[in-house]
Image: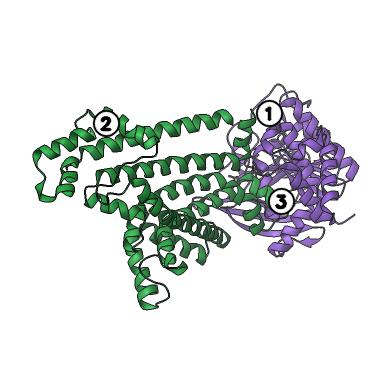
Amino acid sequence: MTTPVYAVENLIIDLYTPTVSVRAVDGASFEIHPGETLAIVGESGSGKTVMTLGPLGLLPEGVAIDMRGTARADGRDLVAMSQSELSAMRGGEFGVIFQDPMSALNPMLKIGPQLAEQARRHAGLSAADARKEAVSLLARTGIPDPADRYDRYPHELSGGMLQRAMIALALAAKPRVLIADEPTTALDATVQAQILALIRQIQKEDGIAVVLITHDIGAVSVLADRVIVLYAGQIAEEGSAIDVLTRPVHPYTKGLLASVPDFRSEISSGTREIPGLPPNQTKVEPGCRFAERCSIAQPSCLARRPTLLPVGDGSVLHRAACPVVLNAQGVAHQ
Amino acid sequence: MRRMFLRRAGLALFLMLAATALTFAIVTAAPGNVAALIAERAAGAGADGEMIKRIADELGLNDPLPVRYVHWLGKAVAGDLGESLRTGKPMMDEFAERIPVTALLLFGGGVIALVLSIGLGLWGAVSNGGVVDRLLHGAALIGASTPNFFVAAMLVIVFAVGLGWVPSFGASGATSWLLPWFTIALFPASVLARVVRVNLQEAMSRPFATTGFAKGLSRRGVLLREALPNIAVPFITTFGAQFTLMIIGAIVVERVFGLNGVGAFFIEAIRFRDFVGMQAVLTLFVVFFVSVNLFVDLIAMFADPRLRRARRA
Ligand SMILES: Nc1ncnc2c1ncn2[C@@H]1O[C@H](COP(=O)(O)OP(=O)(O)OP(=O)(O)O)[C@@H](O)[C@H]1O
Ligand SMILES: [Mg+2]
């Protein structure tokens, strides 16, 4: 197989603020290859953002971060990189779009020149060519009248248009990985579908890797090749989108899918919330993090931390971290 | 924009009227008899009750306060602020001589405060909690809590008396302005440096800063390109407020450094109970306050594209 464009292994990320310390990511691994779309799902606070953006140094200032494990982009070690190498990596290999384009785009800067600058820096274009490139990027992301929008400020565009501009900005330096952190959460329902279609189209045309962080199971089913289900900084289940969505194994995944309205799945009989709240991630305890909310938890669940093991449904990629279910299915584990 | 401007200008006019009326009332109510003062100055010890009464009648000093204010206002609008009771010269002539001195003091101090505060605020943000940041924080606290006269004394002792680099007194050449400028700039520079530093920090924790990092900018790049433009409005507003306050500083600084400006004149006016002079200077201060604020509001509106759009609507 090719070198993954982005991969982390046994990643542990502790966050420290003056008041709290949190183990936001607790031994997670993932990798993504060119042309692939990886969805990361999980409740709010499960560590989706920290896991994907943390190794790139893209967490907000004011949080001290302690990272262990390995993180590589295109085989290059992100952990060992100098600040300037990491900056170059962020500006070249990765494009990022965020949840709320209104706050993620600088209110004091015009949209177009930012795109032009990215294109310029990446491809060494002349000012005039960079402007053309920026306008064509705006056109490509479906922004009507792009030459006019070039000189607009963020507040002059609607949320959907802004998210398109954000996507254009992320693409301007021709990245190999596009990270979309809940790209549709802040948008109107009608616009959501358009933005997802745009991401899909770009992914197809450019063959780039897409990491899609989302709460939207519908989006996962449409876009994703593979899915990671994150719970309290740990991976509960992972596998192909079809496997995870139609044959979920982990009780948390089942609960998550059941809590989605009108998602076709044999488990869902109406919408149900997962009872209880995510655990307090300030203390790191042994055992399964989900045990206290789990309907099939056994005393042994609290004793040992479950590891990800193949589910045994014929797909080696489909793995879950729940010995109770796997035992019941007769899957041997060590 | 036009309507907004007219509204601001109208408000400014109203503020000027209210403030001059208030100062007029206060100055008039202050102890001391203008007519007696004038009579004394004209006739020396020979001023008698009758003369005083005649002068008071001539000047309309026995009219009710509102009438006198309107009278004063009418002349002021026509450019006549009366004659100083102390020097006997028309206040407009006094101002023509002294405003340039004060203006130069404020302008130089303002430029120094502007440059220092942005430079040091940025430097602190680049250092971000490092030694430089903490030293600058401490320096700003000291700078904002040391009174003008003390700063002036220290600067004079070190640079004029000790090192002999600059004159300690009077306006004689470019170097003579350095000490007054730095003295008057110290307080606003300290306050503004903190404003820059704190607002930069706040901007750096906003999502658009993360976008800046994602674009591939270095931290310094994000500070300059993304964060700095975003502090424009709070900075301009605070700068305006600090700049108007510098006129208060000018009263002390002009006196200490022997500059013949409006501030020094004001102190003399108080000492000689020169009510006409006091009222004229206070009026000038009011006009200065109000017009600087108006100007600053307009600049802030232009600095922020979101406010700028309001003018198109
Ligand atoms: N800036 C921060 N300061 C303090 N704690 C943080 C910060 N960012 C994240 N955390 C903590 O790290 C953990 C993981 O957060 P993260 O943002 O990765 O979750 P998420 O899955 O992306 O959630 P959401 O769906 O709400 O975006 C949470 O416990 C959160 O409280
Ligand atoms: Mg998140």
Q: Chain drawn green, letter?
A: B
Distance from Cα at disc 2 to Cα at disc 3: 67 Å
Residue sitting at 18 percent across and 49 percent down? B41
Q: Which chain hosts label 2?
A: B
Residue corresponding to mark 3: B214
Q: Secondary structure at mark 1?
A: loop
* 10 Å crowding of disc 1: few (<14), some (14-19), many (20+): some
The N terminus of chain A lies in which quarter of the figure?
A: bottom right
Residue corresponding to mark 2: B68
* 10 Å crowding of disc 2: few (<14), some (14-19), many (20+): some
Q: Which chain hosts label 1?
A: A
Up/down of B308 relative to B285, above or below: above
- The amino acid type of the residue labelled 2 equals Arg
Figure disc tally = 3
Ligand 2 lies in quarter: top right
Residue corresponding to mark 1: A259
Residue A196's x, y, as percent? Answer: 80, 34
A203 and A275: which one is in front? A203
Residue sitting at 40 percent across and 60 percent down? B143
Residue B313's x, y, as percent? Answer: 64, 27
A147 and B245: which one is in front? B245
Q: Chain drawn purple, letter?
A: A
- The amino acid type of the residue labelled 1 equals Ser
Residue sitting at 27 percent across and 28 percent down? B66
